[in-house]
Image (cartoon, grey):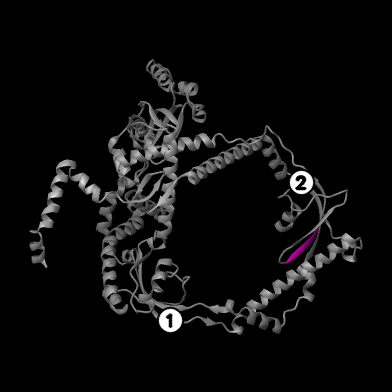
Amino acid sequence: MLQDIRDNAQGTIAKVIIGLLIVSLSIWGMDAIIGGFSGEPEVATVNGESITEREFLRTVQFETRQRLTQMDEPDPAMLDEDQIRQDVLEALIQERVLILDAQEQGLELSDADIDALITQMPQFQVDGQFNRDRFVSAVRNVGMGVSEFRENMRKNYVINQIRASIAQSGIAADENAAQLLRIQNQTRDFRVLSVNAASLASQITVTEDDIQAFYDENADQFREPEQVDAAYLSLSLGALAGAIEISEEDLRAYYEERAEEYAREERRAAHILIESGAEADATLTAIQERLAAGESFADLAQEYSVDTVSAREGGDLGFAGRGVYDEAFENALFALDEGQISGPVETGFGVHLIRLDDVRRSDVPSFDELQAELRDELARTRASERFAEARAQLADAAYAADDLAGPAEELGLEVRIVEGVNRDGGPAPFDHAGLVRQLFSGDVLEGGFNTELIDVGDNVSVVARVRQYHEPRQRELADVREDIEAMLEAQKTREALEARVDELVAALESGNQPEALEAGGWQQFENQGRDGSDLSPFVVQRVFAMPRPVAGQPSVGKAVGQREAAIILVDAVNEGEVDAESAEFQQLRQFLTQLEGQREYTAYQQYLRNTAEVSRD
């Protein structure tokens, strides 16, 4: 075949193709030739604008990482990749629709605008100044390049401007807030006559025929799912650490190495906080000049600081260690010498002048106090290296073995047994969905292989295999008889309660009151709110769902629960009070305004999406 290719390469057709390539390269260049043949693949277009495959895949990777970080126990096997791809594509389409709309409105950030935003972001600052190394490092840590981050900022900023302008245009009428408060604060006058299950006990019987009939009619409810008995090996860092011997000499050396870390440094700071804005520089200059002239820092804090709590104490913030303050504030504070005042430090709260008033360090705990903690820490540190090796060794051994006995002997582990694991899980470690999914996979369940090594917890890895498979089976009536009897008793109790209150309500409405109603037992409630009585919640809920009394006649209703029921007479509905000046009213109105603004923005998004020309490849 190779010789045929060589021969054909000397033919007329090959020479023509080569000639065309040479002409093309001389006119348009290599990029044009490659681009003409390849082009960047796209996954969709929005109003003629492409969403490239590269952009789509990068966003899918980012979204996958985000969803993993939100899991208590990250497990890629738990992710629905198809759903992620679908969600990402729809989000990119919606984003592109909004970006194109922003461009049509003339909303766009220049490179200088982007630079200004980035340099003002506190997370990219050191000692109150923009630090390029920190910026680049932070951007790379989230899996982006600098240019990509800048482009994302450009897109997100203009989208957020549109969102904010529309959301802030929401209007909620005062009457809407007032009406909601009137309903929320409404009270009612009512009477309740309760009927409990104990009074009807003699009417409730469950026969063997009832139990048999229920079992026959609902046989599927009493089928046990397929199950497996599983054998498994568990490898844990904790177990390895517990087996490691730590000598007294090593422990004392480790104590000397770590002792300084236990001497926690705390610093007492005072500050003057100024709001950021056009006048901040002038205000700070005035304060600094007065400090230089010998005026008291405490007096100036009382005069200027917008942190009114600390201002009353002369700006004093008390002692604090690292990890308490904003990062820029902390870095500035821990760079000061005692008595020194910092330059302006900008945080999300405003601009600070910080003075270091005192430094204290806690004493180093004794060796005896830290001995147990250090022994465990050192053992786990040493075991972590062995754990990584043992984990890889176990994964390889289990993959190649026909059972677990060989890997167990090789690593000195115990083969453990768990019975009755179904597809919904079982006792630990089979409460881990990824391990269960492996256990019921075709290779393991039918092929007799071991599972892959699965990380089921913090430094705990498990490999398992099926010992015995159990087909789904019908549970015998004797095994479930008590459950059915309890179920039927509860059902009949509720039916009896409902029948009794229906009888009493009918008597009330007809005017022919039976002895039970005439005998009393009514509870009277006046001016009661939704959470102001000792009644069962389902009764209170029914009270406030009943209609208003008409023509002086109480409205009649009932509420039925599992072990009690109630007849309810609502005598009056009292409107809730509304104070338009109260904080409650103002907060509710603000909430309704925000809700309306968000609704308008959502409708605007949907309009743009509906009118856009979208094609998916």
Residue type at mark 1: give it: Tyr
Quadrant into which the N terminus falls: bottom left
Between 37 and 398, which is closer to the camera in this rendering? 37
Secondary element at tag 2: strand
* Residue 592 visible in the current orientation: yes
The relative height of residue 171 versus residue 143 in the rendered view (above or below) is above
- Residue 177, by quadrant, is top right
Q: Residue furthest front?
A: 12
Check the image and report above or below for 189 versus 339. Answer: below
Q: Residues within 10 Å of mark 1 (few under 14, many from 20)?
A: some
Which residue corresponds to mark 1? 469
User: Residue 187 shows which numbered tag?
Assistant: 2
- Taking depth in this image into account, of 564 and 242 the one nearest to the observer is 564
In this view, which residue lies farthest toward the right?
Answer: 512
Q: Position of residue 321 (x, y in %)?
A: 39, 40
Residue visible at 58% across and 41% down?
Answer: 595
**Which range of residues does the magenta coloring cover?**
563-568
Q: Is residue 215 above or below residue 139?
A: below
- Mark 2 Cα-neighbour bin, 10 Å: few <14, some 14–19, many ≥20: many
